[in-house]
Image (spheres, helix red, strand yellow):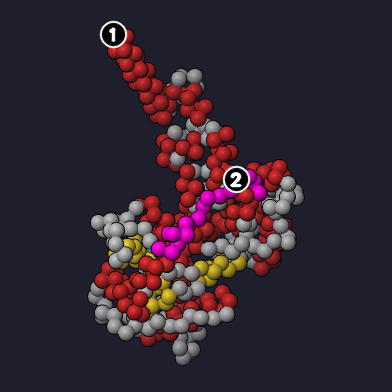
């Protein structure tokens, strides 16, 4: 739910102060919103993204430049594959949608491919909403190539550009995500599929806002369209095996959608994070490095190795996490197994019987593992002596 206007204005002013009043905000995109949903406990990322801080520039100023991003080769390969999938008016793409998601519908023939060109992101978003309404009312296959969607984030619109949105003959909408990583024997890398699902969940939320507006139009309007259904199974299209031929797989994103919605609701309360900061905190990259480090460290972070593929500040946070001996730097799954043991020193002390509750399952498992290791080392030393 959007913030009240007065609170929104005050929050924007506060976030501008944090960013640096002379610096324009860096717009949120679907990848950034999806990364927020992947690490919902990180207040640092929530605040910096909400304030529109350019984290890549900030990382450079902190002396921990980011290697985050896509290589030029991968970018070019992805564009070439997407062009192939969408060739001939999207005939192959529509065939895959029909085959994998809607086989009971009529086969796609000459589908509608509306022109979505307009001035600026606001104009493109309005043109996309109009094209969706017209295609839904036409009750035929339609392909929207790189539509522009607007999603309310902390009281401000974030403009998002999915690879494609398909309108089915029944009036429902499907998000299509085209990726350049391969689908081997019908399955792709689960981690990459998960990232694509989180990104698509952001698009689904934006489409649901458009669908809700269409359903809320006045009854007497001549071109009024009933609220369309946004499908919660998106179509992931990837190269088949090691070829450049497209293969497709439906992906249910209901879980990712729910997580993303909760995280966006949390993002609308970032004023609570900002209010807890010391007076005068600012993340402008032209500040002295010591002052920047103090500002960044004033916001709690939750680092995990997965951040290296999703956040520009990952190297800085990793260095701090390792210096503090935090077990999260070894992975979220390990952190979950260790319960209340949050540092490497705590883990070692518990394993050697110097600390920890013996009835704690994590402590008991660590001590048993330490005993087995000691027995194994003693056995090996005995074998060497003989």
Q: Nearer the viewer, residue 78 or 115?
A: 78
Q: Report helix, strand or loop for mark 1.
A: loop
Apparent side of residue 202 relative to residue 64 in the rendered image (left or right): left
Spot occupied by residue 187 in the image (x, y as percentages of width and height):
29, 56
Compared to residue 273, the image places residue 150 above or below, namely: below
Q: Residue at x 50, y 55 (%)?
A: 69
Task: Please rate how many residues cluster around mark 1, counting C-alpha atoms within 10 Å: few if below 14, some from 14 to 19, many from 20.
Answer: few
Q: Residue at x 68, y 57 (%)?
A: 19
Disc 1: which residue: 386
Q: Are marks 2 and 1 in contact (CB under 8 Å)?
A: no
Disc 2: which residue: 64
Q: Report helix, strand or loop for mark 2.
A: loop
Q: Nearer the viewer, residue 266 or 326?
A: 326
Q: Residue furthest top?
A: 386
From which residue to which does the magenta span run?
61-77
On residue 174, the disc is none
Spot occupied by residue 99 in the image (x, y as percentages of width and height):
26, 71
């Amino acid at each position: 739910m959007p913030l009240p206007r007065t609170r929104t204005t005050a929050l924007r002013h506060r976030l501008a102060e944090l960013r640096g009043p002379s610096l324009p905000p860096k717009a949120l995109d679907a990848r950034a919103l999806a990364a927020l949903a992947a690490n919902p406990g990180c207040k640092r990322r929530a605040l910096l993204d909400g304030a529109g801080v350019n984290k890549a520039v900030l990382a450079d100023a902190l002396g921990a430049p980011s290697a985050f991003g896509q290589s030029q080769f991968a970018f070019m390969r992805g564009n070439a594959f997407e062009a192939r999938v969408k060739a001939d008016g999207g005939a192959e793409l529509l065939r895959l949608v029909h085959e994998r998601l809607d086989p009971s519908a009529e086969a796609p023939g000459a589908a509608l491919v509306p022109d979505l060109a307009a001035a600026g992101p606001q104009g493109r978003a309005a043109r996309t909403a109009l094209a969706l309404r017209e295609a839904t009312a036409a009750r035929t296959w339609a392909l929207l190539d790189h539509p522009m969607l607007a999603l309310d984030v902390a009281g401000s619109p974030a403009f998002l550009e999915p690879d494609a949105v398909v309108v089915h003959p029944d009036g429902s909408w499907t998000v299509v995500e085209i990726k350049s990583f391969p689908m081997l024997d019908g399955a792709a890398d689960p981690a990459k599929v998960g990232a694509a699902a989180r990104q698509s969940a952001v698009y689904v939320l934006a489409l649901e806002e458009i669908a809700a507006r269409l359903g809320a139009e006045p009854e007497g309007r001549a071109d009024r369209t009933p609220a369309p259904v946004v499908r919660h199974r998106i179509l992931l299209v990837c190269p088949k095996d090691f070829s450049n031929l497209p293969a497709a797989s439906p992906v249910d994103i209901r879980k990712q959608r729910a997580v993303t919605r909760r995280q966006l609701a949390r993002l609308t309360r970032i004023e609570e994070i900002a209010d807890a900061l010391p007076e005068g905190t600012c993340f402008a990259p032209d500040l002295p490095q010591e002052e920047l480090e103090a500002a960044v460290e004033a916001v709690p972070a939750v680092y995990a190795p997965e951040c290296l593929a999703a956040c520009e500040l990952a190297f800085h946070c990793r260095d701090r996490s390792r210096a503090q001996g935090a077990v999260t730097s070894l992975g979220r799954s390990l952190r979950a197994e260790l319960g209340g043991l949050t540092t490497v020193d705590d883990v070692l002390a518990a394993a050697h019987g110097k600390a920890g509750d013996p009835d704690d399952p994590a402590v008991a498992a660590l001590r048993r593992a330490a005993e087995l290791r000691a027995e194994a080392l003693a056995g090996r030393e005995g074998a060497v002596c003989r």
